[in-house]
Amino acid sequence: MLTLTANAAQAIRDLTATAPEPAQSGIRISSEGEGANALTLSLATAPEPADAVVESEGARVYLDPVAATVLDDKSLDAGADDQGSVSFLVTEQAV
């Protein structure tokens, strides 16, 4: 299952704090098209019916079935650039 770093959890909490339903809001990672070549990330107020839910430190990530499979052994990290724009990075899980 996808894991979240402390940085990613904080970034997700920051992004969802102003959402209409912050208690259920999270980010959703979904596949574009048939393959796993393109995953998109968006804010979501709740999971879709088939989504896997990852919760860590008060942050929620919703994964569609393809994304859940592709990211099963991965970790999600986050950082910010000099302008404060958040970016997410998928890495291999530490053993």
Image (tube, rainbow, N blue to C red):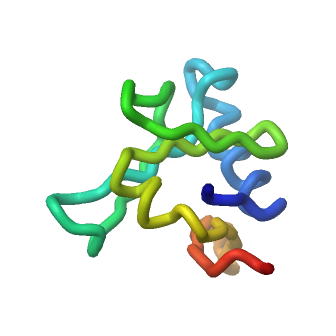
Residue under the image location 62 percent in, 56 percent down: 1
Residue 4 x, y percent position in the rendering: 72, 59
Quarter of the view holding residue 22: top right
Which image quadrant: the C terminus?
Answer: bottom right
| Residue drawn at (70%, 34%) of the image | 17
Seen in the image, is 67 located left or right of residue 91?
left
Residue 67, image x and y in percent?
Answer: 40, 57
Q: Looking at the picture, does residue 93 appear above or below residue 19?
A: below
- Residue at figure coordinates x 62%, y 59% from the top left: 2
- Horizontal side, residue 8 vs residue 68: left or right: right
User: In the figure, 78 relative to 46: above or below?
Assistant: below
| Residue 50 image-quadrant placement | top left
The quarter of the picture where residue 74 lies is bottom right
Q: Quick one: 17 or 8, which is closer to the camera?
A: 8
Q: Position of residue 59 (x, y in %)?
A: 72, 42
Q: Position of residue 16 (x, y in %)?
A: 63, 37
Q: Classify residue 75 as left or right of residue 41.
A: right
90 vs 12, nearest the viewer: 90
- 5 to 15, vertically: above or below: below
Front position in the image: 71 or 38? 71
